[in-house]
Image (cartoon, grey):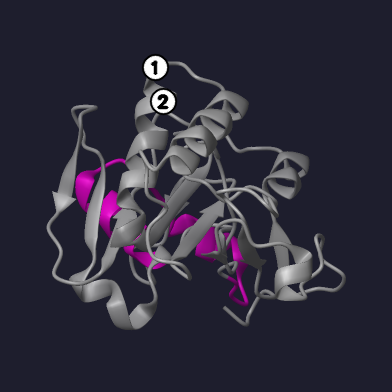
């Protein structure tokens, strides 16, 4: 079983939205009248079937049936875990990282996301990945996909889930809308959250500018 990530790390990661560089995320907690009984139902996310099922939780509910799922299989190989029929690609949790993190994004973002995974595999840091992709997007070598494309993230500190409900223990949901080179002035959005559940713009003026939205628990 993977180790739980400290709460403070989770808080810091609320501001991170790129599957190529982030390690963990959040989602609605599973609660019952008997927490002890509920925890007894939790099992490790340690099979391809479990990784597919939990990865799909990052996709909008109406799009889960047709979403493609990619990620690491039981043999440690990065593969297509399930073919898809719609515009979404879901990235399953990495079993080699602590906590749980799944993401789902519009297919037009795949070149950008794939490039991030390639650079990460080369050992590049988050800062290096950002700088290299910024340069490649500006030069036209790399596309950021369609303006307004979305990335949905479902993450939490524990890599365990309830097979009956499909919920990941302690996980929560957030999503972003990519708006390359947008700024606070061009969108009217603040550069930091001013209230719970309030959208704001992150990485303004860069290739990775995006609107960040973190629904309140129970409203996602």
Give how far across and how far down residue 11 sits, in percent.
Answer: 75, 49
Checking the image for residue 122, the label placed there is 1
Residues marked 2 and 1 touching at CB (< 8 Å) = yes
Q: Residue at x 65, y 64 (%)?
A: 212
Check disc 2 and report its element: helix, strand or loop: helix
Q: Residue at x 20, y 72 (%)?
A: 86
* In the displayed structure image, the side of residue 173 where residue 152 appears, left or right: left
Image: 167 above or below 95: below
Checking the image for residue 58, the label placed there is none
Image: 9 above or below 212: above
Task: Judge whether residue 157 is colored magenta.
Answer: no
Query: In front: 178, or 93?
Result: 178
Give how far across and how far down residue 73 sits, in percent.
Answer: 21, 37
* In the displayed structure image, the side of residue 113 where residue 11 appears, left or right: right
* In the displayed structure image, the side of residue 20 where residue 203 appears, left or right: right
Check disc 1 and report its element: helix, strand or loop: loop
Few, some or many residues within 10 Å of mark 2 (<14, 14–19, 20+): some
Task: Judge whether residue 32 is colored magenta.
Answer: yes
Q: CA distance from mark 2 to mark 1?
A: 5 Å
Residue 96: quadrant of the picture: top left
Image: 34 above or below 115: below
Magenta residues span: 31-57
Say if residue 167 shows up in the picture. no
Few, some or many residues within 10 Å of mark 1 (<14, 14–19, 20+): few
Q: Quadrant of the C terminus?
A: bottom right
Give how far across and how far down residue 124 sits, in percent.
Answer: 50, 19
Say if residue 128 shows up in the picture. yes
Disc 2 designates what residue? 119
* In the displayed structure image, the side of residue 215 where residue 68 appears, left or right: left
Q: How many marks?
A: 2
Q: Residue at x 36, y 55 (%)?
A: 109
Give how far across and how far down residue 40 sits, in percent.
Answer: 47, 56
């Amino acid at each position: 079983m993977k180790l739980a990530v400290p709460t403070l790390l989770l808080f810091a990661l609320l501001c991170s939205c790129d599957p190529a560089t982030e390690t963990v995320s959040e989602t609605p907690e599973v609660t019952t009248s008997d927490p002890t009984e509920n925890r007894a139902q939790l099992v490790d996310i340690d099979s391809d079937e479990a990784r597919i099922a939990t990865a799909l939780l990052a996709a909008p509910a109406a799009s889960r049936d047709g979403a493609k799922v990619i990620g690491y299989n039981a043999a440690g190989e990065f593969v297509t875990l399930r073919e898809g029929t719609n515009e979404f690609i879901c990235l399953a949790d990495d079993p080699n990282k602590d906590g749980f993190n799944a993401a789902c994004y519009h297919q037009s973002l795949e070149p950008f996301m794939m490039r991030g995974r390639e650079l990460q595999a080369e050992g590049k840091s988050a800062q290096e990945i950002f700088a290299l992709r910024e340069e490649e997007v500006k030069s036209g070598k790399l596309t950021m996909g369609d303006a307004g494309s979305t990335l949905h993230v479902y993450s939490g500190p524990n890599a365990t889930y309830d097979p009956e409900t499909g919920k990941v223990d302690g996980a929560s949901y957030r999503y972003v809308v990519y708006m390359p080179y947008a700024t606070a002035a061009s969108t009217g959005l603040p550069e930091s959250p001013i209230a719970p559940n309030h959208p704001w713009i992150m990485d303004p003026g860069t290739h990775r500018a995006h609107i960040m939205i973190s629904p309140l628990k129970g409203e996602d």
